[in-house]
Amino acid sequence: MSLHKNTFVVTLGTLLEWAEFTFFAYMADDLSRIFFPADHLDMARLKIYGVFAASYFMRPAGAIFFGHIGDKYGRKPPMIASLLLMSVATFAIGVLPTYASIGTISSILLVVFRMMQGFAVGGEFNGSMVILTEHNKRRPFLAGSWTLFASTTGMVIGSCMATMVSSFSRYYENLWRIPFLLSSFLALTAIYLRKGMEETEDFQIAKKSGSLFQFPMIAAWKYNRRGLLCTAALSMFVSVYVYTGNVYYKTIAVNVGGLSLEKASFAISIGIGFSMCLIPILAAIADRTNAYKMCLISMVGAVFLSPVMIFLATTGKFLCTICGQLLYGAMDALTSATAYTILTQQFKTGTKYSGISFAWSITTALFGGTTLIFNEFLLNKTGTAFSCGLYMSTCALICLIVFQKTVNFSLYRSVSHPQV
């Protein structure tokens, strides 16, 4: 399989998973009325946020399971198995009866299927990044960026689908089911295509030389502690940044700024779309310049610009809301184009899949899965959305400090990737 075809096959599954995940997040208000009692809408929304969080708490388990397989038996098997599980769970949500039909059983099954999805994503997202960077050593940052490009593109699609469903659901009651069903069927196509993927040369060399490990996670803790810490810090920052600066941004724009739902949805679509377009461009630049410095610039920018971004969402002005999303997209793209590939360079071949997946998933479970709930708490407790912006800045600052302490800057002095 050619390099370009391999890239397409790997990233297609990532795109579909993130499209579905984003659609679910953006449809929180609608889904809360579908799967929970509608007597108290605020409580129903918190419950659907809880379902969103539950899927994240299953990611570490999926990371351990699929990461172990990926580091011990090859990168290909977990990529197929995780996507298959994701497609089954997504299809099940698409045909799930509503609360009005079967009551509490509907709510329980929704939680179960979302947990299955979270388990599957634990082995998909980081696995695709590992495979792409191992397949293309000449341009590692551009290669690694395609995973982020795919996930961001999935967010664009998920956002657009949510906007359309929200606009036309008054005419078609079950319109919300179509994105779930379509995603599950497309995932089956991606699974078929992934059967033709080639194993990475790095893994084949490690296997022949006997440098794989019996227990990859233990080996990751023994040999790559700095990499684990670096991954955890980035995961915390990205989780809070994305789900506050984009997903919850919509809630702030509507509930605090007073912007219409349609305009707020359009604004966040622009933010994700802007990031999507920038990612491969910035990654190509990173392969020719200094990716580490570019990465640090993105984190410094997030520290200082996050409160500004949130303030713009509270103005109630459409153009200001869009400007806030353009700030979000620029910092998100700069991070996506550089930081993730830097992570893969902090691990041995035999610990890379397990180490990155586990550290990323467990931190994402703690921060990504709770960000929507925590922001709701901050907003209600402080009475100002500015606190949400400070939350983003704090996480960006922590990540910046950890990166400076854990990544060897001298390796990136003249070129973007280490000379080893």
Image: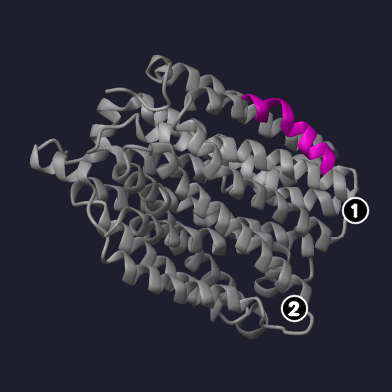
Say which amino acid is labelled 1. Gly
Q: Quadrant of residue 266?
A: bottom right
Tell me residue 311's x, y (percent). 83, 37
Q: Which mark is residue 258?
A: 1
The tag earlier along the polypeptide, 2 or 1, is 2
In this view of the protein, which residue sits in the foreground, 384 or 102? Answer: 384
Q: Is residue 330 left or right of residue 256?
A: left
- The vertical placement of 367 against 41, above or below, is above
**Mark 1 burial class by Cα count in 10 Å: few <14, some 14-19, many 20+:** some
Say which amino acid is labelled 2. Ser
Say which residue appears at 60% left-offset and 29% top-offset.
Answer: 298
Residue 347 shows in the view: yes
Say which residue appears at 55% left-offset and 73% top-offset.
Answer: 180
Q: Quadrant of residue 326?
A: top right
The magenta segment is 300-313
Q: Quadrant location of the C terminus? A: top left
- Magenta stretch: residue 153 in it? no
Q: Is residue 168 left or right of residue 393?
A: right
Separation of marks 2 and 1 at Cα, in angstroms: 22 Å
Badge 2 vs badge 1, beta-carbon distance below 8 Å: no
> Where does label 2 land, which residue?
169
- The vertical placement of 185 against 223, above or below, is below
Say which residue appears at 48% left-offset and 39% top-offset.
Answer: 363
Tell me residue 301's x, y (percent). 67, 27
